[in-house]
Image (spheres, rainbow, N blue to C red):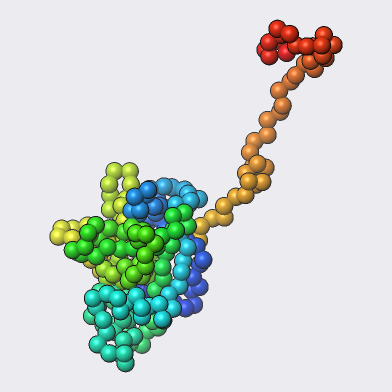
Amino acid sequence: VLLRLLLPLRESSPLPPEVVIQSASSGRYVTVAPDGWLAATTFSPTEPTSRFVVRSVGPALLAALTEARSFSPTSRANAEDELWSGGGAGDAPTEASPRSAAPCRWVLLQSRAAGGFVSVRGQHESDEYVVQLAREGSLSYRSLLLLTSAGVWSYAVGGYLNFRVDGATQPWRAHGNDEPRRQLLSLPLSARAFVRRPPPTPTTSELLHAAPRRPAPEFDWGLLLDAARAGACGTTSAVTL
């Protein structure tokens, strides 16, 4: 069972068009802050900033993104083999024999509310290990993610994303819980996440029908008729009417 938790989702598991991501340790959902940084902050899966559109990555886009980073395959012949089972930062958790395993399904997560792609900063970069939206809508290998049945794996860092504790929120980071900071290859409780379809957003009509119905306040129409017969309300106050 534990081995199954560490395996990436396969072709038999269709990618949902939109997801919310929930921290298994706190129950909070990941949201996008005004500064673009991501953290588990809300218990509501209907929060607009908690929704992410799943964009699949085809072979051409994958090659374009991975070739733009410092790690590059030694040759075209073994490029795919190195990406899935070689010694680069993007190696994903697979079965004991990765050469016989199906390729991992890298995806991009795009914020439904803000529009930018989720991006993971690597070691020795500015905002080291921070999970944030890519600046100015840019797209790079830092946005390649793998959705597993128990967590989210980053290609750029080569490890799981982890929820750190900071008061009432859990900032999403790409390092473990111990010092010195390094990529997270195991899956502690703090890194476990449920990636699921969001609940449907109720329409305005559904909200109106679900609202409690209150009887209209009583009104003495006789007072209004008296005022009309007099030709004007005069000094009669609204309270009197």
Residue 8 in the image, given as x and y percentages of width and height: 38, 73
Give the residue at x 39% y 52%: 32
Residue 147 in the image: above or below residue 199: below
Residue 63 in the image: above or below residue 78: above
Looking at the rendering, which quadrant does residue 98 occupy?
A: bottom left
Looking at the rendering, which quadrant does residue 153 occupy?
A: bottom left
Left or right, 7 with reference to 181: right
Residue 170 in the image, given as x and y percentages of width and height: 32, 50
Residue that lies at the very extreme toward the bottom in this rendered image? 77
Q: Return the residue nearer the eye: 71 or 232.
A: 232
Left or right, 64 with reference to 19: left
Give the residue at x 49% y 70%: 15
The quadrant the C terminus occupies is: top right
Residue that lies at the very extreme toward the left in this rendered image? 180
Q: How many marks?
A: 0
Give the residue at x 74% y 20%: 218
The quadrant the N terminus occupies is: bottom left
Residue 65 in the image, given as x and y percentages of width and height: 34, 75
Residue that lies at the very extreme toward the top in this rendered image? 235
Q: Is residue 17 visible?
A: yes
Give the residue at x 28% y 58%: 130
Residue 156 in the image, given as x and y percentages of width and height: 28, 70
Residue 178 in the image: above or below residue 12: above
Q: Is residue 93 visible?
A: no
